[in-house]
Amino acid sequence: MNSTAGKNTLTDRTTVAIRDVLAGKRRGLRSALLFAGPAVIASIAYMDPGNFATNIQAGSQFGYTLLWVVLMANVIAMLFQALSAKLGIVTGRNLAEMCREQLPRKAVFVMWCVSEVAAMATDLAEFLGGAIGLALLFKMPLMAGMAVTAVVTYGILVFEKGGYRPMEIIIGGLVAVIGLCYLVELFIAPVAWGQAGLHSILPSMPNREALTVSVGIVGATVMPHAIYLHSGLTQGRTPASDASEHRALLRFSNREVIVALFFAGLVNMAMVIMASAAFHAGHRDVAEIETAYHTLTPLLGAGAAAVFLISLISSGISSSVVGTMAGQMIMQGFVGFRIPVWVRRLVTMVPAFVVVGLGVNATQALVISQVVLSFALPIPMVALVLFTRRKDIMGEFVNRRLTDVAAIAATVVILALNAVLLLQSFGVSIPGMPAS
């Protein structure tokens, strides 16, 4: 991120205040809030339009049954975002840069290519989500909605020139809008809270289609670009000068990750709960965002439908901004040079315009994009585990044994889900899995 050193900007004042906290000159809740930002920005990746698509499918078709998948994915996300932030704080390098420095050249090239595909899949979900919301709310063509989303996204990215703090506040405000919208929805929808609580902790997998949706949920929740991004967001803030400051920064970072991703997890679960309460009983065929909007109006009223679209538009715009930031950081880290924001924006949004131009079903494209992300996800996960468990890289902040075990287990779960989905795609029968 660009610095504005020498000017009395919001970013500069925040940096000075953080230095005072690290020096023991400031304390309290307001001081802790100075460190909030990186996890808030990363958390928008867990509330992007891809989540809307997969969560609507999960809730309408399977009721509350797959809530445990959302919870599991969110816990995994907390762990890996914390590790990503730790890598950036301790080494001063983001994950893509560490890959370029530590891994063989051929491996780096493959990782970069996979990451670019993941970035395009991410942008597809974000652009389509914002465009669908605008098209439905303002009765405009989908292509026009995408153009508006592109312009607004670029306008917000301009604030990045003011340093890290303005962007953190803007994204934080949009995250709050999404959360408030779903709080309102839960008050409107007739939720069976007992069933929701039970299925949040009781694992079950009704059929193969539920497995596909579950992998989509994981792909929409634990995002490859967010894992790369978080390590870079900590780079652009206040660097630590000694081990004591490193420990303080890690402590504040871990707290922020827990709070920000707990909030994101609640929003994701609220999406499934709302879809289940509104659609599962008599509208299980609701699997598209457009259908969900039109069905919500007679079921819960025009207000509920409008709130749904406002949250979708906020999600599409904010996640599109964050996706561009992540894509630029990933390319810069892997190839070693910086490109203009508008070029980065153009590269990743072209596939989204192509998909819409070809007339592909928008919501189905969203769900497929999340499955693609799930297949790309193990690469940064494996790299992050490898780097954070190496003492020559992390020093005294190397992963503890329990952290290693948890991170490796989470990676194995993702790989296993992907393997099962791949076998299912080729028609291989899976023991204990109902056919339909």
Image (spheres, grey):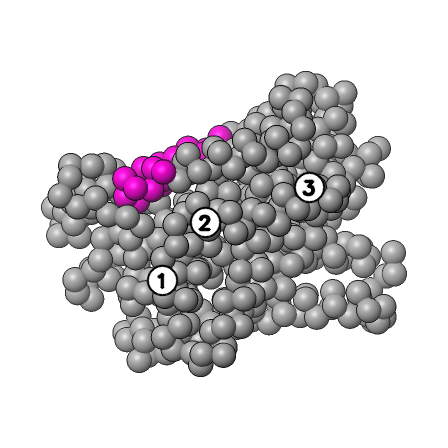
Q: Is residue 169 magenta?
A: yes
The disc, 3 or 2, on the residue closer to the chain's N-terminal end is 2
Identify the image quadrant of residue 129.
Answer: top right
Residue identifier under label 1: 337
Q: How many residues crowd mark 1 within 10 Å: few (<14), some (14–19), many (20+)?
A: few
Q: Amino acid at mark 3?
A: Val
Task: Report how far apart the C-alphas of labels 2 and 1 lie in the structure.
Answer: 13 Å
Q: Is residue 166 above or below residue 412?
A: above
The disc, 2 or 1, on the residue closer to the chain's N-terminal end is 1
Residue identifier under label 3: 356
Residues at discs 1 and 3 in contact (Cβ within 8 Å): no
Please state the extent of the stretch shown in magenta in the rendering: 158-177
Label 1: state its secondary structure.
Answer: loop
Residue 327 locus on image (x, y percent): 46, 54
Residue identifier under label 2: 343
Q: Amino acid at mark 1?
A: Phe
Side of 88 relative to 424 (left or right): left
Front-lying residue, 67 or 369: 369
Q: Is residue 356 above or below residue 348?
A: above
